[in-house]
Image (tube, grey):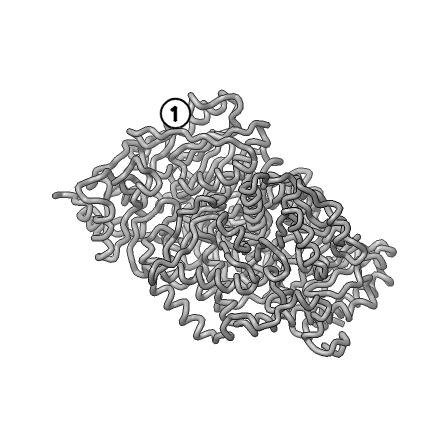
């Protein structure tokens, strides 16, 4: 069957604290070239700790073995296809890791004189320009640290603009297929949220939207393509409806990798959007972060962007703090600069034509996988797929097997599962995003695995329900973990 | 593949997009470059910075040595190229390291629980303020003026949209520490949180016990902020605080022109359900073996949506792993010795200069205005490939002429002597 995996040895490994023994060390500091100062005298005895109780004491070899062994317990893009829908797990080019560590960039202090930071500022300016061109927007801020932080920034910009027009308004509209961050962000920005029901094609219908829009609505948050991987074909009409009532259109750019080089939000009526540089522009997810959530706006929102802003003064870059209408800072300093370096390197490596080709390959791969799986799994909506396709577990649920079980069985075949049970509008969703960096052979193997599982569900559902069978760790008792939380190690 | 799909061409996959939505021209971005050209471009940009300079800048971003082990570990593809560990069975590696991270943060801060990371120190501050508001059912926030100015700016941005009034507490003009009398005056029964930083922006160590006692007397929570994590190698952990937030940049995270860094939020156990961000918990698998998984996610946006404790999703996992490896390499003895070296270096330089504030300090202190302006001092130092301290007028107009100077283990005695000379010491 699928030839991707066979068993091999994995090492056991205790926690660092369990490896620890008194007096062990893995570091060597240089001899102090000034007199030693007594901490008790300098800081006061009350302010000084005797020791860091139970902190690890291990050797250098202990450290490398510990983390290397743990690393082998992890799945990763470097090991194979990672088809998490909406997460865009594409290959992370290693040259980007190298250039982000360039001495003069990695060690640049945010407060060093501007005359000695020109290279870093130039990198940011170049990235701002590239992202403005890709999105068709007028200005970009690189300050937000992640997608949700970008959403937050975008809604504050919306609020500031509407406030300057006399009324910040009260509500944000979001389709029922939206990411959870959208409603959570609206709350943080001081707005109530109203869900817009998707139509039977899985998209927003202009009629439903028109009925919901009034003078209380500040903005629509729309993901395009949406979380079903379906392009909102009526997006222009949607934008017109919003604009006619003085509302903004916010685009969640989580799925921008389906549009780069093909269509630009700035050209189809979007006022403000964020980009996840750790998705579309391939900066590594690193087990959950860091990301970067650049926000792009049309010119009417530009005066409100967080500061400072880059400004060209003669032949040099300068930071401009004189921004009377700015929403203020959303984080210290200028953004996740190291992530920005990687994103620019990605854009440079691809170039305009390469970025467009990457988009087309991503859409090709998703449609190919959809085609292979459609005979075995129920496609949730018939509309054409962009970069991802969403199935439901309807057929398998009849045998008592749900999307979460199929996902666990995929692990036995050597793949990371797809996104489970999202979007919420699909009952028992299997959300598959292969990305453009998978070749046909890996996609065929992945599809073959899912087809084999569909067959197993028919013949031996109990076996699937107990998956995974081959991992060093079996199904984890997540209910138990939440019921009696143990969130740190303690000496017993 | 096109044949399998039944598509004529790659372009035809987009034919359902309305004509007026599609971009009719190529992107105006130069054609793709080779790996060598990309490396060359960034080397050139790196050359247009302060490459090779010694630095006496701190102010929230510190130049500490990074053990080689750190990049060795985080460069492993299994960590670098994995996603958030929702699938516990194939994510035990990162889950275990996060559990160790949470544990070490608790050990350092004296708190009961810590999360898997926040974006950075600055954004962790408003998250703590909002958490305190949920816990106390109050909305007013008091923040020390000696908290990092940019952290306070971020707090102001968040608080104003939450309808949370923020008021500043003065610092004592003599000691540079928070003015406890001013704090007592401003505290009332509407106050949700009192936010202090230690060592504060001027480097001064705060009296946490007293600040906590004042806050608690009015039913407010004390939020302790740290920006220089190495200080915790020597300083008494802030056990009297209710919530601790901080920035781990000092733990083997390069200054990187301001990010990515890693923030933390830690708290007393009773406030656990109001914590933002991801948490890893210990459990067992079906075979009865110890296993870890993400837990208490009913606080989070993907489950609770508009009722979540925060909108945070992506955090700083890989950066937190850098800090975890750093803490493992230095360990119990090393972090103390490192902190001791920082303390000794700063006090060596301070002994040669007129120090503005009398409060105890760790590795940063303020130099009084002298005959030369900060610009003159720093200009002279730049000629010697030394970046001097921060001119405080930028954030504190009343401290015009004063300079914030930081000494880590990375500066040498001879460089410190140069700095002392530039300030006019011994003239």
Residue at the outermost left position: B427
Left or right, B166 with reference to A199: left
Q: In the image shown, does B48 or B223 lie closer to the viewer?
A: B48
Q: Nearer the viewer, residue A293 or A63?
A: A293
Residue A291 in view in this figure: no
Instruction: Name which residue lies at 63% across and 47% down.
Output: A246
Instruction: Tell me what residue is drawn at x 24 percent, y 55 percent.
Output: B382
Label 1 secondary element = helix
On the rendered image, what quadrant is the C terminus of chain A found in? top right
Question: Percent x, y for residue B404?
Answer: 30, 42
The chain carrying label 1 is B
Residue A154 spot, x, y in % from top left? 56, 49
Q: Is residue B307 left or right of residue A61?
A: right
- Compared across the picture, whether A435 is left or right of A134 comes to right
Q: Position of residue A479 (x, y in %)?
A: 71, 43
Quadrant in the rendering for residue B225: top left
x, y percentage for residue A410? 73, 62
Image quarter (top left, top right, bottom left or bottom right) of the N terminus of chain A: bottom right
Q: Identify whether A371 is placed above or below A487.
A: below
| Rendered view: A333 above or below B139 | below
- Give the residue pinned by disc 1: B180
Task: Determine crowd level at label 1: few under 14, some 14-19, many 20+ residues with C-alpha closer than 10 A.
Answer: some
Q: Nearer the viewer, residue A35 or A297?
A: A297
Q: Which quadrant of the figure has residue A465?
A: bottom right
Q: Residue at x 38, y 68 (%)?
A: B43
State whether residue B222 is above or below residue A420.
Answer: above
């Amino acid at each position: 069957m699928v030839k991707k995996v066979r068993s091999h040895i994995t090492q056991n490994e205790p926690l660092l604290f369990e490896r620890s023994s008194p007096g062990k060390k893995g570091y060597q500091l240089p001899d102090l070239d000034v007199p030693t100062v007594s901490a008790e005298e300098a800081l006061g005895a009350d302010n000084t700790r005797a020791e860091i109780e139970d902190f690890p004491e291990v050797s250098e070899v202990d450290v490398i073995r510990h983390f290397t062994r743990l690393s082998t317990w992890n799945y990763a893009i470097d090991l194979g296809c990672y088809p998490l829908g909406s997460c865009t797990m594409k290959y992370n080019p290693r040259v980007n890791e190298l250039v982000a560590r360039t001495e003069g960039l990695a060690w640049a202090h945010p407060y060093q004189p501007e005359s000695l930071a020109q290279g870093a500022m130039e990198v940011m300016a170049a990235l701002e320009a590239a992202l403005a061109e890709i999105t068709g927007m007028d200005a970009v801020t690189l300050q937000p640290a992640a997608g949700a932080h970008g959403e937050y920034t975008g809604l504050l910009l919306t609020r500031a603009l509407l406030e300057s027009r006399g009324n910040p308004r009260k509500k944000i509209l979001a389709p029922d297929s939206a990411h959870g961050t959208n409603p959570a962000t609206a709350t943080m920005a001081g707005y109530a949220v109203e869900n817009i029901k998707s139509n039977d094609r899985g998209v927003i219908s202009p009629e439903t939207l028109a009925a919901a829009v009034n003078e209380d609505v500040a903005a629509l948050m729309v993901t395009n393509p949406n979380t079903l991987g379906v392009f909102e074909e009526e997006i222009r009409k949607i934008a017109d409806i919003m604009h006619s009532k003085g509302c903004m259109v916010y685009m969640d750019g989580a799925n921008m990798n389906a549009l780069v080089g093909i269509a630009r939000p700035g050209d189809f009526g979007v006022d403000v959007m964020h980009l996840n540089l750790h998705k579309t522009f391939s900066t590594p997810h690193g087990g959950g972060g860091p990301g970067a959530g650049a926000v792009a706006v049309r010119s009417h929102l530009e005066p409100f962007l967080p500061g400072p802003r880059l400004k060209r003064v003669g032949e040099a870059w300068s930071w401009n703090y004189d921004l009377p209408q700015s929403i203020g800072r959303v984080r210290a300093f200028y953004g996740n600069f190291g992530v920005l370096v990687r994103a620019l390197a990605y854009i440079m490596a691809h170039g305009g034509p390469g970025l467009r080709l990457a988009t087309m390959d991503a859409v090709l791969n998703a449609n190919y996988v959809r085609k292979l799986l459609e005979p075995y799994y129920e496609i949730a909506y018939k509309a054409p797929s962009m970069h991802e396709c969403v199935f439901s577990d309807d057929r398998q649920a009849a045998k008592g097997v749900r999307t979460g079980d199929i996902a666990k069985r995929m692990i036995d075949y050597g793949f990371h599962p797809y996104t489970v049970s999202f979007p919420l509008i699909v009952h028992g969703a299997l959300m598959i995003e292969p990305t453009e960096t998978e070749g046909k052979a890996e996609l065929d193997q992945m599809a073959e695995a899912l087809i084999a599982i569909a067959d197993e569900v028919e013949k031996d559902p109990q076996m699937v329900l107990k998956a995974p069978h081959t991992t060093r760790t079996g199904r984890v008792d997540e209910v138990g973990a939440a019921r009696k939380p143990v969130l740190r190690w303690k000496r017993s | 593949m096109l044949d399998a799909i039944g598509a004529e061409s790659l372009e035809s996959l987009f034919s359902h997009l309305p004509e007026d939505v599609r971009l009719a021209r190529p992107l105006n971005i130069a054609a793709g470059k080779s790996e060598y050209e990309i490396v060359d471009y960034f080397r050139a940009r790196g050359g247009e910075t302060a490459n090779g300079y010694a630095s006496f800048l701190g102010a929230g971003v510190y130049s500490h040595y990074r053990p080689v082990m750190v990049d060795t570990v985080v460069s492993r593809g299994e960590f670098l190229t994995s996603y958030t560990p929702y699938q516990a069975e194939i994510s035990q590696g990162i889950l275990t390291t996060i559990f160790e991270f949470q544990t070490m943060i608790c050990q350092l801060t004296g708190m009961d629980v810590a999360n898997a990371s926040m974006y950075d120190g600055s954004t962790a501050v408003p998250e703590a303020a909002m958490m305190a508001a949920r816990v106390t059912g109050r909305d007013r926030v008091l923040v020390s003026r000696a908290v990092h100015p940019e952290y306070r700016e971020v707090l102001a941005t968040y608080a104003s949209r939450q309808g949370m009034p923020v008021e500043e507490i003065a610092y004592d003009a003599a000691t540079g520490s928070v003015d406890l009398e001013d704090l007592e005056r401003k505290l009332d029964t509407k106050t949700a949180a009192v936010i202090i930083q230690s060592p504060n922006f001027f480097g001064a160590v705060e009296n946490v016990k007293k600040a906590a006692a004042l806050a608690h007397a009015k039913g407010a929570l004390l939020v302790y902020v740290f920006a220089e994590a190495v200080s915790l190698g020597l300083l008494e952990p802030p056990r009297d605080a209710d919530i601790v937030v901080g920035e781990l940049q000092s733990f083997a995270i390069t200054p990187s022109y301001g990010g990515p860094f890693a923030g933390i939020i830690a708290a007393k156990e009773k406030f656990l359900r109001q914590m933002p961000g991801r948490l890893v918990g210990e459990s067992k698998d079906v075979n009865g073996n110890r296993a870890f998984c993400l837990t208490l996610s009913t606080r989070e946006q993907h489950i609770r949506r508009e009722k979540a404790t925060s909108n945070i999703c992506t955090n700083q996992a890989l950066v937190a792993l850098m800090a975890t490896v750093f803490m493992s390499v230095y360990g119990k003895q090393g972090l103390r010795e490192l902190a001791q070296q920082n303390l000794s270096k700063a006090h060596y330089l301070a002994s040669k200069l007129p120090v503005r504030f009398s409060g105890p300090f760790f590795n940063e202190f303020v130099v009084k205005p002298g005959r030369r302006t900060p610009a003159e001092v720093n200009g002279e130092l730049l000629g010697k490939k030394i970046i001097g301290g921060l001119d405080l007028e930028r954030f504190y107009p009343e401290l015009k002429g004063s300079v914030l100077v930081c000494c880590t283990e990375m500066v040498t005695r001879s460089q410190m002597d140069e700095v002392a000379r530039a300030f006019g010491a011994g003239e």
